[in-house]
Image (cartoon, rainbow, N blue to C red):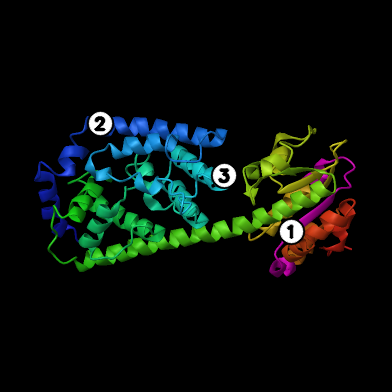
Amino acid sequence: METASLLPLIQSYKSDPESVYNTWFISSEERMKAFRSIRRGVRDLVDAISAGSFGNDFKGSPLEVVLTAITEQKQVFEGAAHSFFWKPKLRIPDIYENESNKRKFGAFLETCLNATREDQILTAMSRLAAMQIKGLGPSVANIVYFLHPTLIPPINTAMMNGFNALFNDNKKLGSWEAYLGMRQTLLQTNEAVRSYLSKDLGAFAGLLYELGIGRLIHGGAVPWGLQLEKAKAEKLAQTRHNDVVSELAEESEHTHMQYMLIQIGRALHYNVYIARNDRHREWEDQLFSMLTVPDLPPLNWSPEVLATVRLIDVIWLEPDSNKIVGAFEIEKSTSIYSGILRLEDLYHSLRDCNCNLYLVAPNQREKEVMAQLARPAFKQALREIDLAYISFNDLHEYCGAMCKFGEDISILKKITHSSVN
C-alpha cells in the first residue's frame, strides 16, 4: 500500500498542539474513563430494554446517559446524540414507540457488548442495517467504538467529509453501505500507518475530523496503489454485507414457517416446542417464547440425543400426556440430510413412537427432498417411520384453513407428500 504520502499529513496532525490527537486522543484522562463508563451504560441500556423500562423518548432514557458520556468527549463527538433525539413528527428514530424495533436495537447492542471477534460485530451491523429501522443508521458506530475501539471507527459529518477529502470520494453519512466500506478502508490504511498513529481507530478518526473541518489540508492526489487497495477493501465490505443480508432474508422465511407451524399447532390445541436457539425469535411482534413451552418434557434420553432433539425446529405435544405427536424440520437452504438425521434420532429415541415427522422446504427443493428420502442409507430405515414433506407454498396457502377447520394433526395429510410407500 502506498502510504508515504500520508506521513506528512500525520506529522502535521500530531504536531499541532490544538488537534484532537493532542487535546483528546493522548492527553485526555477522561477519554480512558469514558470507555469504562460507556460500557456500563450500554449494559444498563440493554437491561432496561429487556426489562421493558426503556421508555418512549430519548430524554430520561438510559440511551441519553450513554450518549451524554460520548458527547462529553471534546469537540470530536459533538452532535453524536442528535441522530438519537426523538422526532415525534417524523416518528424517528423508530426505537421508542415500536417495541419490536426496540428489542432489535437492544439485541444488537448486547451482541456488540459480548462480541469477541470482528465478524460477530460486522454481522450484527449488517443485520441491523437490513432491518431498516427508520431513522436508525450507522451513527450507532459512535457507541460501538467505545466497546471495540480497534475494530469500529466512530463517524460524524466532519469525519465523513475528511474521508471524502482524503480518498477523493463522495460517500454519504447516513448510508450503512458507505460506512462499512469506509470502515474497511480505514482498517487497512490504519494497519499500514499505525506505527505512526495507534491501533485504536480513534486516532485516525481524529485525523479525518481535522480534515473535515478544514484544520488540516490534504493537497496531494491519492496514489494509485492506495486507490486500488481502497477499492478492494470496499468490495470486501460490500460482499460481506450482502452475504449477511441474504442470510437474514433466509432466516426471515425460516422464522415465518416456524410461526405458521406454531399457529397451527396451537389452533389444534397442542403445546408447541420451538428449537431452543430460536426462542428469542418473533414474527409480527409475536414472541415465540410467549407462544411456546420453555422446554421438552423430561424424557429418558442420553445427553447427546437430547441436545440434538432440542434443536428440532418445531415439535407438537399432547397437552395432558406431553406425548410428542409431530416434529418439523425446516430446511430453507441447509442440509436436507441433517434434518432427516435429527428426525430419525427423535423417532428411535421414543418408545413405541407413532408420531408424525415432517420436512418443510421450499417448492424448488421437493426433488432434492425426495431424492434424499430414497437414498439406500435412509430408504430401509424410513419404511417404519412416518416421514413426509410439506412445501413452503402449501403451508403458507393453507395455514389459515387448517387453523380454522383442523381437529388434530391428521389435517396435515391434506398438504403432505411422501416417497416411502
Residue 203 location in percent, x, y? Answer: 23, 45
The tag earlier along the polypeptide, 3 or 1, is: 3
The residue at which mark 1 appears reads as 360
The magenta stretch spans residue 367: yes
Residue at image point 89% right, 63% down: 421
The residue at which mark 3 appears reads as 99
Q: Are marks 2 and 1 in contact (CB under 8 Å)?
A: no
Camera-nearest residue between 417 and 68: 68
Residue at image point 76% right, 61% down: 395
The magenta stretch spans residue 262: no
Of marks 3 and 1, the one in the foreground: 3
Q: Amino acid at mark 3?
A: Glu
Which span is picked out in magenta?
346-368
- How many numbered dots are placed on residues in this image? 3
> Is residue 383 visible to us here?
no
Of marks 2 and 1, the one in the foreground: 2
Camera-nearest residue between 198 and 110: 110
The residue at which mark 2 appears reads as 30
